Image: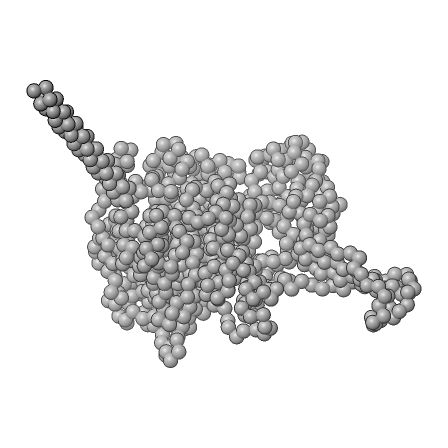
Amino acid sequence: MKKLTDSVALLFLSTLIAGSGLLFITVHAQWGGSTAADNTSNITIAQTGTAFCGNGILEGTEECDGALLRDKTCSFFGFSGGTLSCTDSCHFNTNLCTNNTTSTSGNTTNTNSTPNTNDSSAVCGNMLIEGSEQCDGTNLHDKTCKDFNFSSGTLLCSAQCTFNTAGCSTASTDTSSTNQNTNTSDTTLVQPLPTAPVCGNGKAEEFEECDTADLRGLSCQSLGLPAGTLSCSSLCRLDKTRCSTTTLTTEVVCGNGVAEINEECDGTDLRQKSCAQFGRTGTLRCANCRFDTASCSTVPTENTEITTAVCNNNKAEAGEECDGTDLRGLSCQSLGAAGGTLACGSDCRINKSGCTTAVSTPTATSGESAPTAVVPVPERCQKLGITDLTKCDAVFSLDFPQVCRDANILDTMACEEFIRKQVTDKSCENAGITSEGCPDTLLTKYQDRLYCGSFSTEECRVMVKNQLVGQVAVAAEEQASITRAINEKIGNHATIKELTEALEQGHATGGLIPLKIDTSRTLLVQPSFGTIDVSSGVTARATIPYAIMTDDDGDGLSNDLEAIYGTNPKNSDSDNDGYSDTEEIKNGYDPLSPAPGKTERELSPVEHALINYTRIEQPVSSGTTSPAFAISRVENSEQDTGYSLHGKATPNSIVLIYVYSEMPLVLTVKTDADGNWSYIVTDDLTDGKHTAYVAVVDDYGKVTEKSNPLSFFVRQARAATLEEFLNSETRVEIETKSNSLLRYYIISGIGVICIALGLFGFMLFRRQRQSSHV
């Protein structure tokens, strides 16, 4: 190539197109002083990256763009006519395609010539392409990536039954060209963006089927397999080896040496897990098909010798909740029960089966549960004929299905039957499943989402099938509705106002966001795993598959992490070097110094999960309770405003505090050398009951250790005991009545005094007149 000299006579930019990773710069230059036209060279620098949807150019993994439909029509998707179009997100839209051909759905043959938007019989997820569906699960209508002009890759079907070309790729092409004029050359230099997909960063990017825990919302069921656990391989390809290829017809057997559905492990089958996944060393074991970390030692601190815990030696060691008679000072009463005998199981886990239950009142100052007398059934339940306190709590809690309340059905069993008839039977009927087989089908479909608490796998299956399957189906639909609304309305950042609107669009109940702050504040919306909690045996309660953190500058680092790093929470680039704080920390650079060079500091698993925007588990339904983790107390701050949380966890580590009303608020704090931590809540929480956990997650967002929950109550930005919270309104009423009575007496007294003074004056006036007449 010729060298540009100082005698360049003309240099100008003729074209500049910038947008979402696309940059074209054409440089016209004259060589060596010559002005001849045949010496002109055109150099184009193309910076490739994320496609820009809406620019009328087919790029990246776009299925279409504007009027460019890749020469596809409705017939390509199996329709007989109509108009194919492109959505604003550059996906094919077949809603206006019509179908005069015969399509088979189960044993029913449908013929229609109307636009498919009017077809309400389509059921996405049943492996049948119906209505306006482009695909369904693994049924891709015999299409591949090549049908969309890609050279290779894996074509997928989204949860909305539309084609997903994210796993398709285009072979590199030679974009350089040479004009016929021998002295003129047009050369294209391809300069890739620095944000190329990185396998293993926890985020499924362009050309990746998945990445660690990010499965793009897919599951075994959505891929047409009846059950099992979908995972991601080290090459960022979907791993379906643990998906079941047949419908589960036999019960899961614990002890057969095979880790099956809903089993953490079985015998020596540890699902390739080790103590390292729990942040420890030693030997991981399996007990009752649950991971047994008793033989895993804690992470040693300096000058600490590594020791291995031995279960059943009557000494509660690291990783053990208890051991024999060593209960770590715990009792039934300290765990909130009225009495009874606490025991330690052979697996060195606390056994509360010998404790008697009672309503407990968590105190905001001590963090312990103080047993109280059994509370009578409230009058509002007695009026409805409900005499059982558990049923009363269920009916008047957010857990009790609103559809039953609206129908004035207040018995849990009657509610289940009502829901099953109104919701599940209809869903099964649409899918061609008989009502007799509906409970089994729904149980198989949702069993991987169930959190059963202390119930065994068999007990949980029987309970859900017989009395909760309808509620489970409704809870799963609520999760799906909320997920769709959040995906459509917001990304990973939103203001409180935007998030509230998205939740309302998803038909979620009120009071989900535990923060009471400026609605324009920016929140980081972290994806989470949605589970369905059936541990009460009374109701099925769905956890919202998202968690929130405050992130005022919207850089992907929560305000809490910024406080730990010392970066500016109001500035996404604290050192003003042109790189965001998040990217610098993620890639090993100092976000507070513009000087080049990587730091030696390694990110902890918690930091990895948060910074890489990994889907995180929630401790309310995941993780192993560790005696080393605790929230000891919640108290009002010394400034008489706000409150603070205190507790213990692994020394010199970064841990997460989950604060629940419904959607969890996740706080981040660092422990000291002794494992102590304190967190001052600077943002107001909503009034009412909140439950908090302290926990840690691994690189994949899995909760590895957590504390027991601590409930506390907030009223007017102050922590309060349950008694104070419940009596606050009564005290206000009493004070108001007392004040009114006092004002009445004062006014009456003043009136009496005025009348007496008036009479005295009148008598004095009369006496003076009589004296004057004499």
Image coordinates of residue 559 in percent, x first then y, are: 47, 59
Q: Is residue 578 above or below residue 773?
A: below
Question: Residue shown at 42%/48% (left/top)?
Answer: 516
Residue 306 lies left or right of residue 732; in this view the side is: right
Residue extending farthest top: 773
Question: Residue shown at 29%/66% (left/top)?
Answer: 322
Q: Quadrant of the C terminus?
A: top left
> Relative to the observer, which residue lies in front, 78 or 510?
510
Residue 176 in sight here: no
Question: Residue shown at 36%/33% (left/top)?
Answer: 409
Residue 766 lies left or right of residue 514; in this view the side is: left
Residue extending farthest left: 774
Q: Is residue 265 above or below residue 388?
A: below
> Relative to the observer, which residue lies in front, 715 or 43?
715
> Relative to the observer, which residue lies in front, 635 or 549?
635
Image coordinates of residue 36 in percent, x first then y, are: 92, 64
Image coordinates of residue 232 in percent, x first then y, are: 55, 60
Q: Which color scheme is applied?
A: one colour
